[in-house]
Amino acid sequence: MLGAVIDLDKCLDLLGTLYLRIARSSYENLVSAAASNGREVPKNKDVPNSKDRLIRELDCAVIENIHLIQKNNGTTPFDSVRGVFVEGEELYDGAGFHEKNHIQLCIRNPNASKGFLFQDRRLTGLSIKGTDKSIVATSCMSATNSGNWI
C-alpha cells in the first residue's frame, strides 16, 4: 500500500486550539490521578545524540487518557489523532522551521480508512480502491512516469 483516503471527521486534531485544550485537561487529570494513587506521571524522554524527546511516553499517556475519559463518559470516540512534531536542527539561524518537522496521523478506527492506493506494475494510471463501493478514483499518469499504480 502506498497511500490511503482517510475520513478525519472524528479526529483529535492536535493542531486545533479546542483539541489542545482537551489535551491540557487530560494532562491535568493524569497528574491528579497519579498523585491520588501515589504513581509518577510518565515523561517524554531524550534519545542519545538528539536534543529531541523522541520517546513520547507522556504524550502517549495524555492521548490515551483522552480516549479513556471519552469511554467513561459515553461520548463518541475519536477515530484518529493528528499531531505536529517539530524536530531536528533549525533550517537557518532563528528559524521556526526544523530539519525533521512532520505531521503524524494515527488511525484508531479502521473504518475511518475509506480507500487505499496500491502499486501495480501491470497497469498505467492511478487508482484508489475503496473499502466500500462509493470510493473509486482514477487518474492517468504521464508516459514518462516510471511507476504504475492501482
Image: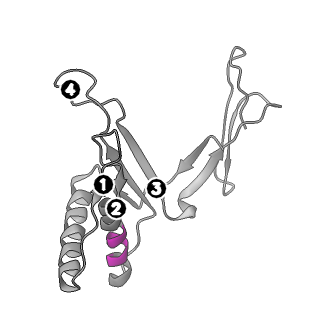
Number of other residues with Cα within 10 Å of mark 3, as a class: few under 14, some 14 to 19, many 20 or more? few
Mark 1 touches mark 2? (CB < 8 Å): yes
Q: Position of residue 29 (x, y in %)?
A: 21, 75
Please check the rendered image and state whether residue 65 is part of the magenta-colored stretch, yes or no: yes
Residue 24 forms part of the magenta stretch: no
Left or right position of 116 against 112: right
| Part of the protein shown in magenta | 64-69
Q: Residues within 10 Å of mark 1 (few under 14, many from 20)?
A: some
Alpha carbons under labels 1 and 2: distance apart: 7 Å
Q: Residue at x 73, y 28 (%)?
A: 148
Which residue is the site of mark 4?
95
Q: Which residue is mark 3?
A: 106
Q: CA distance from mark 4 to mark 1?
A: 24 Å
On residue 45, which mark appears? 1
Q: Amino acid at mark 3?
A: Cys
**What is the quadrant of the N terminus in the image?**
top right
67 or 111: nearer the viewer: 67
Disc 4 vs disc 1: which is toward the camera? 1
Q: Earlier in the sequence, mark 4 or mark 2?
A: 2
**Residue at 42 percent of width and 47 percent of height:** 104
Cα–Cα gap, marks 3 and 2: 15 Å
| Mark 1: amino acid | Lys
Q: Amino acid at mark 4?
A: Ala
Q: Which callout, 3 or 4, points at the residue further toward the start of the chain?
A: 4
* Residue shown at 44% from the left, 54% from the top: 8
Do callouts 4 and 2 mark residues in contact (Cβ within 8 Å)? no
Residue extending farthest front: 48
Counting from the top left corner in percent of width and height, residue 66 is at 32, 70
Residue pointed to by mark 2? 57
